Amino acid sequence: MTQQRQVFFLASGLVLFLIIAFLPEPPPLFVGTETVLLTANGKLCLGLLVLAIFYWVTEALPFHVTALAIMLVMPLLGITDGIQVVSNGAVREISGLAQGYREIVRISFGNDLILFFVGVFLLSGAFTFTPLGTRMTLRMLQILGVSTRRVILGFLVMGALLSMWISDVGVAAILLPIGVGILKHAECAPLKSNFGRALMIASCWGPIFGGIATPAGCGPNPVAINLMRTLVGMKITFLDWMIIGVPASLILIPFGWMVLLMLFPLEIKTLKLSRTDIQNQLKDLGPLSLQEIGTLIIFAVVISLWVFNPIIAQVTHNRIDLPISFVSILGGILLFLPPFRVLDQEKAAKAISWDSIILIMASLGLGMMTYYTGAARWIAVALLGGIHSFSPIVLILTVVLVVIFMKLFLASNTVTGIIIIPILISLAMSFNIHPWILVAPAAFTSSLGIILITQTPTNIIPYTSGYFTLGDFAKAGIIMSFIMTLLIAAVIAIIGPLSGIYPY
């Protein structure tokens, strides 16, 4: 971006903020007999939200820099004034710049989510710096054989299974060289091969589909759990999430596979790559190394603690109740210890995306303040107040469609969740709707950006291979998004009540 273009976007964003800040206060809204006002602080917070979205969409500043700047501006404008917090058992009201700054930092970076993400990035690094991901993909090809249709299915399945536990960006990075190697061996030319198009798009879709299965799969997932606990007092366990997330993730795979095969008829039925070639590649990798064995063991421990923590807590009468962030950082630490020593300081520094962590944590403060100032409630009633009379299934469908539309403009999955979830919680509280009915579809859909390449970095990695165009990706993504909307809504509407997580 040129300097002149950046200055234009920066100035335009400030103008948008000033317009909202100096607009007269809107007339009150009504929920039954209750009055909902947009206060002066709420209006300022709404202006900052619009400013942040504008800068994120135009990329006038790096995402994390925008989030940090907004975090600093909130106490300067007095948005934190009047917020009540509990300190040492007593309720204290925030007043002034210093107290406001400390409180917004506490809300943002004092959250245990920061440790969760550090741990997840370290666990993802274990796959990146060992040949374990490559080995698993080759094993998958060995099982599925050399049919190109099954290879595409295999990439969707492997991408989804890996992305349930490690970063979807990392999974795309694992699949890319393997997929390109297969295409080159099959002599498929970039932009001329439908098999190349389908395989590389499958390398995007598989990790994205898998990211919704568990809280560890993608950034919006733990953020949604955290906001539900902080703003509503409702605890969503790892297993609660998986009860809906795993079926929602797995049901997308066969439909995604059919869409790719329908849009891109394969010109190659079978690969020239034989089972012997795959066996030779596996032989070149050698036996499982000590680091690979260590990664598998540590992953098994982490996943077991995540899934079975409710049982552990019940058996120990809540004496041992492990937060997901505790388990995540425990797994990250174990990767450094003998006898496995999967990671060292240099590898860890490469594995942790501090830009992403800063973006998530700083943006969290903005999301929380939209809730605390009442701005989220006002937006919810003004824009979505009419949906409270919808049936639960139509409610879920509406939320999924709204979030998919928002994803067209926001390149960060987590930011999408941070913006929309406090608004939906406020809507649920205003109209006495169970909040998880609204938050669940938003949380699951926040990471499903499959129409534009720029919706998530996961799409960009396979795109660099040159095997598909932006048009190819958008065409497939639009069709799959319509199907995905119906599938996600159906899974949540059916399994949610049956599981007992929420009633209708």
Image: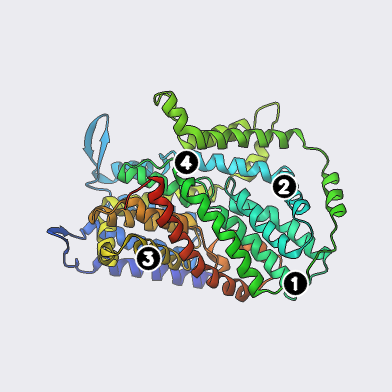
Residue that badge 4 annotates: 238
Are circles 2 and 4 on residues that touch, CB within 8 Å?
no
Q: Earlier in the sequence, mark 2 or mark 4?
A: 2
Q: Earlier in the sequence, mark 4 or mark 3?
A: 4
Q: Position of residue 378 (x, y in %)?
A: 25, 60
Residue at 72% over, 43% down: 132
Helix, strand or loop under label 1: loop
Q: Which mark is residue 136?
A: 2
Q: Which mark is residue 190?
A: 1
Q: Is residue 330 left or right of residue 464?
A: left
Q: Residues within 10 Å of mark 1 (few under 14, many from 20)?
A: some
Q: Label 3, label 1: how many angstroms apart (C-alpha)?
A: 38 Å
Q: Label 1, label 2: how many angstroms apart (C-alpha)?
A: 26 Å
Q: Is residue 121 above or below residue 316?
A: below
Residue 344 seen: no
Q: Is residue 201 left or right of residue 482?
A: right
Helix, strand or loop under label 4: helix
Q: Earlier in the sequence, mark 1 or mark 4?
A: 1
Helix, strand or loop under label 3: helix
**As shown in the figure, which amino acid type bears the numbered disc 1?**
Pro
Q: Label 3, label 2: how many angstroms apart (C-alpha)?
A: 38 Å
Q: Is residue 127 above or below residue 7?
A: above
Are circles 1 and 2 on residues that touch, CB within 8 Å?
no
Residue that badge 3 annotates: 398
Q: Nearer the viewer, residue 341 or 182?
A: 182
Q: Residues within 10 Å of mark 2 (few under 14, many from 20)?
A: some
Are circles 3 and 1 on residues that touch, CB within 8 Å?
no
Q: Is residue 423 left or right of residue 348?
A: left
**As shown in the figure, which amino acid type bears the numbered disc 3?**
Thr
